[in-house]
Image: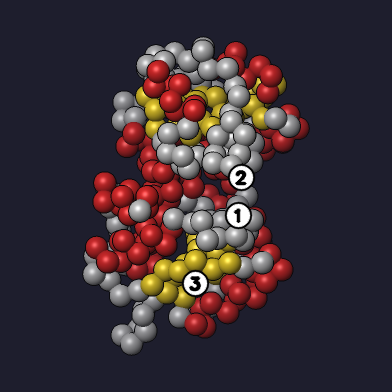
Amino acid sequence: MTENRIPLAGVIGHPIAHSRSPKVHGHWLKTYGLAGHYIPMDVAPEDLEQVLRTLPKAGFVGANVTVPHKEAALRIADTVTEQASRIGAANTLTFASDGTIRADNTDGYGFMENLRSGAPDWNPKDGPAVIFGAGGAARAVIAALIEAGVPEILLTNRTRARAEQLQQEFGDTITVVDWVQAGNVVEDAELVVNTTSLGMVGQPELRVPLDGLQPGAVVTDLVYTPLQTRLLREAEEAGCIAVDGLGMLLHQAVPGFESWFGKRPDVDDATRAAALA
């Protein structure tokens, strides 16, 4: 940032009006008294590269990217972090002064920080994790759990072939389970993660039998609208530790904000309130 140029950042998606990221970053900018702005930008896929190459010239220091741009942003970037390369998608872009684009993926970081905050006694080495879904979010979660030392990941997806593709990419830690058998494997799990959109407002419910959940297991849902999904409600009723998905959104935003605006923000109750406002 030069003395007479206010740093700009934002989130790029298609659509994007639903995003809570502007509320989160706006809250932090105000809280810490920092110069800067963070805005939502609806960009069609065919325009993404042109927009990304233009933003640095307009004073942008970085951007978040979300659906459907995460994979394309990785291909466009000039440099890519090891984490983004491993996940195969980017969610955080930083623009250098010469306009070059650095791509990172902080989704796995956000997921793990949310788990540590919501279930501080969970030990990744204690036992297997069950993951519902095999999309982009699942990739970030799998990479983070393997790095943390989870001994086994039981992966189940409505389309088995997509789960098998992730098994090939991430290795022997993953065991693929048929979707119709998903309810049978939760009884062995120390951690259960829903990475699908099932249970989200406007989407069908996640209809996996959950009566096998063991008391004390950690259950987290990446869906945060509604904040308490059916999965989390039934987990609490079974005596499990339920961790909602909003914290992942908040924690994944931290590295980007620090890179763009020069201050590492705290994720606290006020941040959650700002996101939900």
Q: Is residue 203 above or below residue 233?
A: below
Q: Is residue 162 above or below residue 104?
A: above
Q: Is residue 198 left or right of residue 151?
A: right
Say which quadrant the N terminus sits in: bottom left
Pointer 2 residue: 136
Q: Can you give x and y, in whole percent of width and height, for residue 221 in the image?
A: 48, 34
Mark 1 secondary-structure assignment: loop
Nearer to us of marks 1 and 3 is 1
Marked residue nearer the N-terminal end (2 or 1): 1
Q: Residues within 10 Å of mark 3 (few under 14, many from 20)?
A: many
Marked residue nearer the N-terminal end (3 or 2): 3
Nearer to us of marks 3 and 2 is 2
Marked residue nearer the N-terminal end (1 or 3): 1
Q: Can you give x and y, in whole percent of width and height, for residue 72 in the image?
A: 66, 60
What amino acid is at disc 2? Gly
Q: Which residue shows up at 58% across the image and 67% down it?
A: 42
On the image, which quarter does residue 37 sit in? Answer: bottom left
What amino acid is at disc 3? Phe
Pointer 3 residue: 95
Labelled pair 2, 1 in contact (Cβ < 8 Å): yes
Labelled pair 3, 2 in contact (Cβ < 8 Å): no
Pointer 1 residue: 67
Q: Residues within 10 Å of mark 2 (few under 14, many from 20)?
A: some
Q: Is residue 236 left or right of residue 186?
A: left
On the image, which quarter does residue 173 sit in? Answer: top right
Q: Is residue 143 above or below residue 24?
A: above
Q: Please tell me which residue lies in front, 123 or 206.
A: 206
Residue 102, can we see it?
Answer: no
Mark 3 secondary-structure assignment: strand
Q: Which mark is residue 274?
A: none
